[in-house]
């Protein structure tokens, strides 16, 4: 009994083997690359999401700020207008009453 | 290129461990797929064939471990039935004593079995086996001599 190989293979097996293996290798590589690619891009996606949120937040803050300023300015000018037109005139008139005029006015109401 | 150059040599290393052609074919293809997917871990510290051999042999040993752990087959069934299975295999060209030799080799522990096959059939140097299996040359020499002794004792029972 020598150390000769007692095993055999189907005819043409080794000619076919390379093709069989090569047909499986690219498919396997592609499957394995997909999760790896997502993994590699994950930090970038997180960074992009943070930037988007930050930009969105700044835009919303600026719009709200502008609206608040406009509202305050509108109210102030409206109020200022009232003071000019009615309230201040009444107050001035009231302030110019003297005691006699007040008594006369009270007696006139009785 | 890598597949074309080394597939035949690796096939025979796997076949002598796994014994049947169909299983060897599956194991070898898995080994090449693993090698391809981890090609970036090969830094050229050893020869490419040594690295590929290590992957193929580990794949074959994994396959044998899983086969032994299958609940439908006991370890004894696998060991005692090997010679008969080989004699019935159309891709086994040996006589009965060669089938018995394969059975004796299959009954050895993993390292003794692998070292014996690589020395006996491939005439591989201990230094190359050491790089392939990651075991010291001294331990490999001891394993080989124990393997030879066990195989000799196995055949004595038939005298």
Image (spheres, helix red, strand yellow):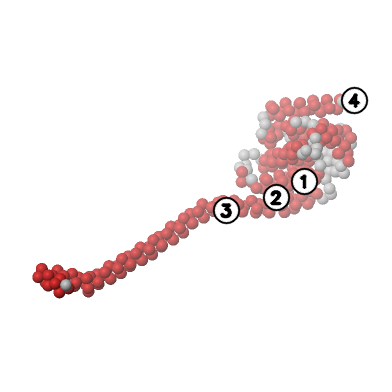
Where in the figure is residue B81, as x and y percent of width and height? 85, 35
Say which element carries label 2: loop
Q: CA distance from mark 2 to mark 4?
A: 49 Å
Front tag of 4 and 3: 3
Number of the label disc, if any, that sits on residue B1: 2
Q: Which quadrant is home to the C terminus of chain B? A: top right
Number of the label disc, if any, that sits on residue B159: 4
Say which element carries label 4: loop
Q: Are marks 4 and 3 on the same chain?
A: no
From this view, report whether residue A78 is shown above or below residue B44: below
Instruction: Report which quarter residue B56 is drawn in.
Output: top right
Instruction: Report which quarter residue A87 is drawn in.
Output: bottom left
Label 2 or label 1, whichever comes before in sequence order? 2
Residue closer to the observer: A105 or B79: A105
**Residue underneath mark 3:** A38
Q: CA distance from mark 3 to mark 1?
A: 33 Å
- Can residue B122 be seen here? The reply is no
Callouts 2 and 3 close, C-beta under 8 Å: no
Q: CA distance from mark 2 to mark 1?
A: 18 Å
- Badge 2 crowding class, 10 Å Cα cut-off, few under 14, some 14 to 19, many 20 or more, is few
Q: CA distance from mark 1 to mark 4?
A: 36 Å
State which chain disc 2 sits on.
Answer: B
Q: CA distance from mark 2 to mark 3?
A: 30 Å
Label 1 or label 4, whichever comes before in sequence order? 1
């Amino acid at each position: 009994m020598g150390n000769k190989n007692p095993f055999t293979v189907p005819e043409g097996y080794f000619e076919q083997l390379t093709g069989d293996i090569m047909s499986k290798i690219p498919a396997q590589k592609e499957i394995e690359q997909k999760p790896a690619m997502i993994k590699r891009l994950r930090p970038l996606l997180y960074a992009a999401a943070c930037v988007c949120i930050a930009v969105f937040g700044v835009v919303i803050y600026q719009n709200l700020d502008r609206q608040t300023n406009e509202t305050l300015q509108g109210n102030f000018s409206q109020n200022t207008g009232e003071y000019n037109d009615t309230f201040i005139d009444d107050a001035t008139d009231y302030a110019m009453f003297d005691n006699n005029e007040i008594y006369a006015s009270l007696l006139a109401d009785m | 290129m890598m597949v074309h150059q080394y597939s035949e040599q690796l096939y025979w290393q796997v076949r002598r461990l796994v014994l049947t052609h169909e299983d060897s074919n599956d194991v070898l293809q898995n080994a090449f797929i693993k090698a391809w997917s981890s090609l970036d871990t090969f830094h050229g510290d050893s020869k490419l064939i040594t690295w590929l051999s290590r992957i193929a042999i580990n794949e074959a040993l994994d396959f044998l471990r899983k086969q032994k752990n299958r609940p439908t087959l006991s370890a004894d069934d696998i060991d005692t039935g090997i010679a008969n299975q080989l004699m019935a295999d159309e891709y086994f060209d040996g006589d009965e004593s060669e089938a018995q030799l394969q059975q004796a080799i299959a009954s050895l522990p993993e390292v003794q079995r692998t070292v014996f096959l690589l020395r006996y059939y491939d005439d591989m140097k201990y230094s190359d086996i050491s790089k392939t299996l990651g075991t010291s040359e001294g331990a490999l020499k001891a394993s080989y001599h124990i393997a030879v002794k066990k195989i000799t004792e196995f055949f004595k029972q038939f005298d």
